[in-house]
Amino acid sequence: MHMADALISPAVGVTMWAATAGLTLYSAKKLKENPDDSQTPLMGVLGAFIFAAQMINFTIPATGSSGHLGGGMILAVLLGPYAAFITLASVLTVQALFFADGGLLALGCNIFNLGFFPCFIAYPFIYKQIAGDRPTRHRILAGAIAASILGLQMGAFGVVLETLFSGISELPFVTFLLLMQPIHLAIGIVEGLVTAAVVTFIWKARPEILNMAGAARPIGRLDIKNVLAGLLVVAAVTGGILSWFASDHPDGLEWSMFHTSGKEKLEPAEKGLHSLFARLQEKTAFLPDYGFMKVEPDKPSKHEASAAPEKKEPWPAVSAGTSVSGLVGGTMAMGLAGFIGFALKKRHKQR
Amino acid sequence: MAKIASSFLDISYLDSLSCQQSPIHRLDPRAKVIATAFFIVSVVSFGKYEITGLIPFFLYPIVLIALGDLPLVYLLKKILLAAPFAVFIGMFNPLIDRAILMNLGPVGISGGWISFASIMLRFVLTVSAVLALIASTGFASICMSLEKMGAPNSFAVQLLFLYRYIFVLTDEASRMVRARALRAFEGKGMGFKVFTSMIGQLLLRALDRAQRIHLAMRCRGFDGEIRVFRQLTFGRHDGAFILGWFMLFVLMRLVDIPQWMGNSVTEFIR
């Protein structure tokens, strides 16, 4: 469920980046308050462990597929929320940079979806509550499964919301939701089972490790002032950016119905930075008449007028001329870019 | 997870690419990170039916790859490997959005296909830019540049630590996987129970390793803070690199160059 850059809009990407940066700064500050310096190598090695553990998989009976460790919950259990969040963020950064699993702009979304929910919601409010201070086998199992399922469900819901707000995918809200939530229910159960098994294993073999993680970082000792300040910043950024959405979509439900009814089709993207850029573009473009989606039948632009004889159908948007010139121009631009690259390489080689 | 196993070979290969000497490699990592970030934001800021306007943006990854002497075919393969998610979500666009937006002679092309093509273009652009960034810069330099640009020290140190131990632990894990595969006949032993104890053992070893590393660090005077040695010099070249691309991206974002070129050509022919 790593989101890709190609599917998000700048407004969503930047907002989630701001939220994630705030969380990372906050977690880093919390870690600094804790003078335990064995944490540094532990976090690094456990982050690498997540990668290594993902190479080991098992066959899920009766399905023919295989499962492996996801990692968010196990890190939270072993490290506590703050260190786990930073470790997960680093894991996702490496995945984004080396494996192109989720883009650079989408990294904020991905860290938030896969890090914030398990570390700051599912772990303290579900796992800790169920497993308690004196865990038993069953409590660990129940806590890990419940926390993994809920953490992943919230993460999947985050993916759905972020994708919808970006408006690049056509998937209607309900369809997308029905697609994402059940898949992640299954993944959550597997993840919960694996987490429970590993935690139980550690709890049997080296119980002091779990006690250490549980005791060293009490939750609830939150510095309210800092939390409020952070929230304020996030709210200001969010408000500033989301206010663009607000004008178009006064209400999430209404918006999703609008989307589902499939009427928005012929409109150019009219929200967020898109509209800002689009307006700028309209003002500055040499060719305001370009664009297959602009429906302006009343005032045929200069170019359409010149291509008028070919236009038979009543469909307003596009004359064949515009499409063809778009294709010709696109091919030329691509060729030119390729040629520049080729020339640069040649020149570089000669030197 | 054959993909993951081979991906780790890729990490070291990508990193070895960053050790070359080229005009791109010599740039300050911050310049490349900032330019790439601006590139991605400009690319994704287009409307969802945009195709022609996106094409000039190929110039950026192409220039990085050409000047940085990076292997094009290898990078293309990596892009293909990462494609399934974007394809999976994007495929719904042609199914849902069927209004014909464009006619090429007798063939009508629906809005869904146009926006799908747009998604794929964005995907190739953003992924190739990130891969070119990492291949021409190297992970350690990117971490340092992040720290210089205000990321918390503990996050930068975490990235460096993680990166250092990925190789060690994945080597260990791949040996375990191979050992199990050699002893597992007809799928026996691939089940949950064996898996659990393997993961558990791996985790225990990782924890022990962390403890040893910690002790070794203490012996060498570690006091809880890691000082990252960095020699980053932000010169005139770097400023020019950022500024040049910045202006070019703004131009390409505001002016649909291919459409303009295409129009002039078709006008001329007519």
Image: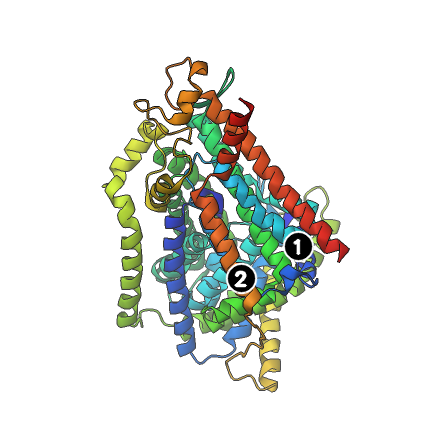
The answer to whether residue B185 of the structure is visible from this angle is yes
Residue under the point 42% across and 34% down = A287
Disc 2 residue type (three-letter):
Ala
For discs 1 and 2, the disc positioned in front in the rendered view: 2
- Quarter of the image for residue A331 reads top right
Could you tell me which chain the residue with mark 1 belongs to?
B
* Residue shown at the point (60%, 52%) measured from the top left: B131
Q: Position of residue B60 (x, y in %)?
A: 57, 50
Which residue is pictured at 59% across the width and 81% down the height? B217
Q: What coloring was used for the rendering? A: rainbow
Return the residue at label 1.
B67
Instruction: Please tell me how crowded label 1 is: few (under 14), some (14-19), or many (20+) other residues with Cα within 10 Å.
Output: many
Residues at circles 1 and 2 in contact by the CB criterion of under 8 Å? no
Of B208 and B217, nearer the camera is: B217
Disc 1 on helix, strand or loop?
Answer: helix
Q: Which residue is mark 2?
A: B240
State the residue in front, A325 or A43. Answer: A325
Q: Which mark is residue A216?
A: none
Q: Amino acid at mark 1?
A: Leu
Same chain check for tags 1 and 2: yes
Label 2 packing within 10 angstroms: few (<14), some (14-19), many (20+): few
Q: Is residue A246 above or below residue A130?
A: above
Residue with the most extreme top position = A312
Chain ID at mark 2 = B
Q: Position of residue B80 (x, y in %)?
A: 62, 41
Which residue sits at x=60%, y=43%? A337
Mark 2 lies on a secondary structure that is helix
In front here: A161 or B235?
Answer: B235
Residue A91, placed above or below residue B47? below
